Image (cartoon, helix red, strand yellow):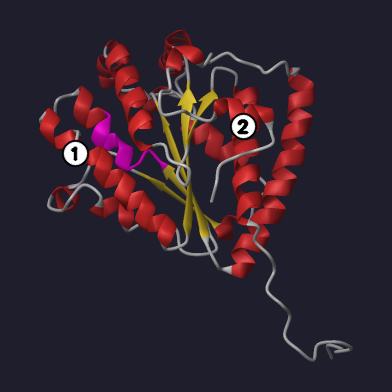
C-alpha cells in the first residue's frame, strides 16, 4: 500500500529517508484555529469509525499503528482521544515496557510479534519493537554492532507483516523539551498524577539529544512506502489529535475495507 495522501498536512508529516527533526516544529498548527480544529477532529473520527467498522466486518486485513514518543509525549492521551467513538471490539491496544524475565529469554521481536493484530482489527502499540533501537542504544544496553543490525531485522519483520495482510503506520509524537518539562512538572505537582512520575524520568530527560538522534536514525533506517513514519507535532494536544486522526483516515481509506455481502435469501425476511 502506497502512502501518498492528498491531504497536505499528512504529506508534510511524512518522514523522508533524510528526515531531520529540526525541520518539524513541535508547536506547528498548520494555520488551524483551535475551535475549528476540534470540529474537524470530530468529522475525522466519524470517518475513521465508519472505516473501522468495515475493517472489522471484512476481516481481510489489519492496521497496526505504532506510537513512539519521549516520556510525557502524549501516547496515552492520543489513544484515549483518537479512539473515542471507535468500536472497542475492533481495537487491540498493547503497551511494551521493560522486558520480563521470560521475554529476555527470547529474541527481542518475540514479545512484539505475539501481539500483532489479527485481521479485522486496528492494533495499537504504545511503545514497540523500536525500544530496541532507542532505549537500548541510548543507555548502552547492548553494543552498537548489535543494535545497528536491528534496523534490517525490523524492516524485514514489518515487510513480513505487510505481506501477510497487516498494514503498518508508525507515528512519532514530536514534543519539545520545554513542553516535556512542563508536563513532567505538572505530574510532580498534582497528587493525582504523581504516580506517573519516576525519578528515572529525569535521567532520560538528561539524555534528550541522544534520544533525538536515536529517533531520527530509526526513522531514516526504517521508513518505507508500506510502513511509513510520520512526525506529528505534539506540543498542542488539539493539533496532535487532528493530525493522527487524519493519518488513520488516510491509511484506512487506502485499505478500502468493505462490508461482506449479505447471505442470500434475506430479502423480505420478517423476524417473528
Residue 135 is left or right of residue 240, and the answer is left
150 over 90 or under it: above or below: above
Q: Which residue is mark 2?
A: 10
Residue 238 occupies quadrant: top right
Residue 154 is left or right of residue 83, and the answer is left
17 over 251 or under it: above or below: above
> What residue do we see at 46% from left, 63% from top?
118
Write down the region rendered in magenta: 126-134
Residue 266 in the image: x percent, y percent? 81, 87
Q: Is residue 132 magenta?
A: yes
Residue 131 in the image: x percent, y percent? 29, 35
Residue 154 in the image: x percent, y percent? 30, 44
Tell whether label 2 touches label 1 (CB within 8 Å): no
Residue found farthest to the top:
178
Label 2: state its secondary structure. helix
Separation of marks 1 and 2 at Cα, in angstroms: 30 Å
13 over 48 or under it: above or below: above
272 over 93 or under it: above or below: below
Counting residues from the start of the chain, the first of labels 1 and 2 encountered is: 2
Label 1: state its secondary structure. loop
Label for residue 149?
1
Q: Is residue 10 magenta?
A: no
**Count of numbered tags:** 2
Amino acid at each position: 500500500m502506497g502512502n501518498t495522501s492528498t491531504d497536505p498536512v499528512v504529506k508534510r508529516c511524512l518522514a523522508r529517508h533524510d528526515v531531520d527533526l529540526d525541520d518539524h516544529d513541535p508547536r506547528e498548527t498548520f494555520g488551524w484555529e483551535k475551535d475549528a480544529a476540534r470540529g474537524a477532529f470530530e468529522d475525522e473520527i466519524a470517518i475513521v469509525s465508519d472505516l473501522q467498522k468495515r475493517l472489522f466486518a471484512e476481516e481481510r486485513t489489519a492496521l497496526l499503528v505504532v506510537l513512539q514518543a519521549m516520556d510525557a509525549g502524549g501516547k496515552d492521551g492520543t489513544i484515549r482521544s483518537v479512539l473515542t467513538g471507535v468500536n472497542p471490539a475492533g481495537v487491540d491496544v498493547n503497551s511494551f515496557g521493560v522486558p520480563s524475565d521470560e521475554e529476555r529469554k527470547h529474541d527481542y521481536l518475540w514479545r512484539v510479534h505475539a501481539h500483532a493484530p489479527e485481521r479485522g482489527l486496528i492494533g495499537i502499540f504504545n511503545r514497540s519493537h523500536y525500544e530496541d533501537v532507542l532505549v537500548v542504544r541510548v543507555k548502552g544496553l547492548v553494543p552498537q554492532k548489535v543494535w545497528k543490525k536491528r534496523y534490517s531485522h525490523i524492516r524485514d519483520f514489518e515487510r513480513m507483516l505487510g505481506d501477510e495482510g497487516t498494514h503498518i503506520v508508525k507515528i512519532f509524537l514530536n514534543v519539545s523539551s520545554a513542553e516535556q518539562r512542563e508536563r513532567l512538572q505538572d505530574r510532580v505537582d498534582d497528587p493525582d498524577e504523581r504516580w506517573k512520575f519516576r525519578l528515572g524520568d529525569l535521567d532520560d530527560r538528561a539524555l534528550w539529544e541522544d534520544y533525538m538522534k536515536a529517533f531520527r536514525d530509526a526513522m531514516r533506517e526504517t521508513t518505507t512506502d508500506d510502513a511509513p513514519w510520520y512526525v506529528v507535532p505534539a506540543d498542542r494536544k488539539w493539533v496532535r489529535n487532528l493530525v493522527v486522526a487524519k493519518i488513520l483516515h488516510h491509511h484506512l481509506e487506502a485499505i478500502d475495507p468493505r462490508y461482506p455481502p449479505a447471505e442470500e435469501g434475506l430479502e423480505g425476511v420478517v423476524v417473528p
